Amino acid sequence: MTVLAALNGYYGRLADRGEVPPFGYSTERIAHIIVLSPDGEPVEILPWQSLSGKKSEPRPTAVPQSFKRPGTTPRSFFLWDNGKFVLGLGVDKVTRQRVAHPANHAAFQELHRRLLAGTEDAGLAALLRFLDGWSADRFDACGFTDAMLDQNFMFMLDGDRNDRGEPRFLHDRTAARRIWERAVAEGAGEEGICLVTGARQPIARLHPAIKGVMDAQSSGASIVSFNNDAFTSYGKEQGLNAPVSEAAAFGYGAALNALLARGSGNRLVIGDATTVFWADTSGGEESAQRAEVLFHDLLSPPAAEDADEAQAIRNALLPVSQGRPVREIAPELDERTRFYVLGLSPNIARLSVRFWLEDSFAAIAERVGRHWEDLRIDPAPWRTAPAVWMLLRETAPLGKTENIAPQLAGEVMRAILTGGRYPRSLLAAVIIRMRAGDPVNGVKAAICRACLNRDSRLGTKKTEEIPVSLNRDEANPAYRLGRLFAVLEGAQRAALGDVNASIRDRYFGAASATPASVFPMLLRNSNHHLAVLRKGDKPRLGGWFEGEIGQILGGLDSGFPRSLRIEDQGRFAIGYYHQRYSGKAAASTEQAVATEQTVSED
């Protein structure tokens, strides 16, 4: 099934639940209601806002559909718009002074006088009288303020309320709906075969704006558009080059905007990729909703407040990491439920589809479990399964999510969901961060292990799987050198205590990339550290370090290699982590808590 067909199908599900506007309407953020008297006088300006956290924000409301306004000719929306159109006034972005926009207000007047001509509806007639009597001189006297001008207004007749006692807006009045339906039908374009439904219907010339993709234009971006002659063919214009009916375009746009809405629960922002997901209802509405909640938890497990909660989350998700069937996690969930995942990223005024996946939920959960198994490392650097953003943060300078390399998030998500190889840039980015001086922590070591294990499993040249915990018999030279580096660092710390710059601070990068240039010097210096321990109050500890160095060097068949490939640098980091933190569960717990100091993904 194509992206647009799946989204259009999801629109039907949302419509059944009453969560999307009908055809011809869209959900917009409206901040104020202009209450009109029957004579068209502004009686009151009511705020129409909802609380989001500690501040109020414009309330999403179904209004006659908006559209993109390219070019310089102003085009007004029907029965709602911002201050430039409704009042002919706006605020200059530079001077922050009130300025007039007569062309915009004229467009608002022209549209409504044309569509509402001859109306006998009291509310619509009041709007026409308001337009006849309005002038900028009345702005302050009518109760408007400059802070309102950049926000959207809609109208209602004074005292007009529905059966539930809620305000009934002008666009909700029966007469207004009929006028709008007639205007939409008259504006329908050329008929053709719709690529989504297969039916002969009016084709959409312009597709709806999609809002909510991180870093995309706030006014919305297009997922289907043709803005250059090079993209067109057979003399077709704009949307006729990819014929999608007006109804299908509206359906997929409404569904995608609902998925992308803040707090929808079907949206994840990871790096520069905004991911939405949904299930079909072949197993029932309850099963579909349960699958969506579980998918969110799999890719972004909820943060645990304490150890008990962390254990509960771990127990709930453990069957996935062990590859056990989904029915053991959620018996009420139908494993055959089809599941859809769409990754989007901004591309100026358009959206790029980073990945598109359609499969059964059981198959997707199995791949996520395999991803966790590839990441498994001991001691575990997290209390619950790691969220994807937590992994990607380890690749970013200063640990800031905004510094994650472009496209990396989408490629990692695709590897997780399809079970394919992780992008080579993921391993390279982690190696670079460690060589640049970032801590060699468990998350970075786990990423290295996951990349190498998956390459080994999926590649044509099979190699042995990287061990989960310290393996003293592992013969790989890079792994042993990582262990040796950790032992030498430990000897220095035991002998000298905390120093301004340890050998890890100075030599980790060189030791992991060009061992032959560093290790001979480090071994000579370790003789001094071991002598300090033997002559001091820690002779047994000095003997233990000496034994470890001998055991590791005894397993190296030849001298120190001149250089290590990037894969071996990953093995070096894993060996270092295993040796450095082996048997230190308490330290690991502290590290896990620090690792989970969170950055919200939304």
Image: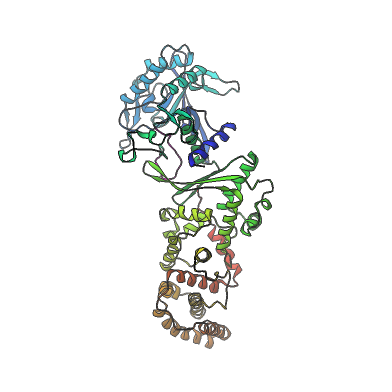
Considering depth in this image, is 499 or 244 the residue closer to the camera? 244
* Residue 116 percent coordinates (x, y): 42, 16
Q: Say whether residue 66 is magenta.
A: no
Determine the residue positioned at 40% across, 75% down. 563
In the visual, does 90 lie left or right of 412? left
**Is 381 above or below relative to 474?**
above
Work out whether residue 188 can be spotted: yes
Q: How is this picture coloured?
A: rainbow
Q: How many marks?
A: 0
* Residue 152 percent coordinates (x, y): 43, 29
Work out whether residue 302 can be spotted: no
* Residue 510 percent coordinates (x, y): 40, 74
**Is 439 above or below relative to 198?**
below
In the visual, does 204 lie left or right of 19? left
* Residue 567 percent coordinates (x, y): 46, 69
Determine the residue positioned at 51% across, 73% down. 576
- Magenta segment's dominant SS is loop
* Quarter assignment of residue 186: top left
Determine the residue positioned at 57% across, 73% down. 470
* Quarter assignment of residue 310: bottom right
In the visual, does 585 lie left or right of 111? right
Considering depth in this image, is 261 or 467 the residue closer to the camera? 467
Residue numbers of the magenta segment = 206-217
